Amino acid sequence: MAVSEPLTRESQIRRLIENLSAYIEQVHGGTVEFVSLEGDDLKVHLGGACLNCPLQPSTLHGWVEGTVHQFFLELHVVATN
């Protein structure tokens, strides 16, 4: 039985964002993509139905940031264009 290497912090965050994006896409057709992780700054891109949506700040801060903070409280989540 091979022992797998532990996931890095960045790979854990990438997986979390992928899972969150799948949920958001299923619920209302939006997407969230991992852009970069620089220190404690997580940059994401909202797309799909989230693009130009007036509720984009709610999705970013409520769903994305709220979910990320359940696992990585120290991160600052920022949306990029």
Image (cartoon, rainbow, N blue to C red):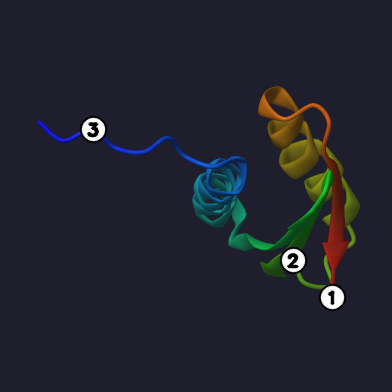
Judging depth in this view, the residue of 55 and 31 nearest the camera is 31
Q: What kind of residue is marked 1?
A: Asn
Q: Could you give the CA–CA distance between mark 2 and mark 1, rounded to whole angstroms?
A: 6 Å
* Label 1 close to label 3 by CB (< 8 Å): no
19 vs 57, left or right, is left
Q: Position of residue 35 (x, y in %)?
A: 70, 66
Q: Are marks 3 and 2 in contact (CB under 8 Å)?
A: no
Element carrying mark 3: loop
Reading the image, the residue beneath label 2 is 45
Do the numbered discs 2 and 1 sit on residues whose CB atoms are within 8 Å?
Answer: yes
Q: For residue 55, what is the image quadrant?
A: bottom right
Amino acid carrying mark 3 in the image: Val
Residue at the (82%, 48%) spot, across then down: 39
Q: Mark 2: which amino acid? A: His
Give the labeled residue for mark 3: 3
Q: Name the foreground residue: 32 vs 34.
A: 34
Q: Measured from the top left, where is residue 8 in percent x and y?
A: 54, 42
C-alpha span from label 3 to label 2: 34 Å
Where does the image place residue 40, in percent across and percent down from the top left?
A: 84, 43
Marks 3, 2: nearer the viewer: 3
**Residue that numbered label 1 is attached to:** 81
Callout 2 secondary element: strand
Q: Position of residue 79 (x, y in %)?
A: 85, 61
Residue 60's label in the rendered image is none
Relative depth, front residue between 35 and 57: 35
Quadrant location of the N terminus in the rendered image: top left
Quadrant of the rendered image containing residue 81: bottom right
Q: Earlier in the sequence, mark 3 or mark 2?
A: 3
- Distance Cα–Cα, label 1 vs label 3: 39 Å
For label 1, the SS is loop
Query: Within 10 Å of the Cα at label 2, are there few (<14), some (14-19), or many (20+) other Cα atoms?
Result: some
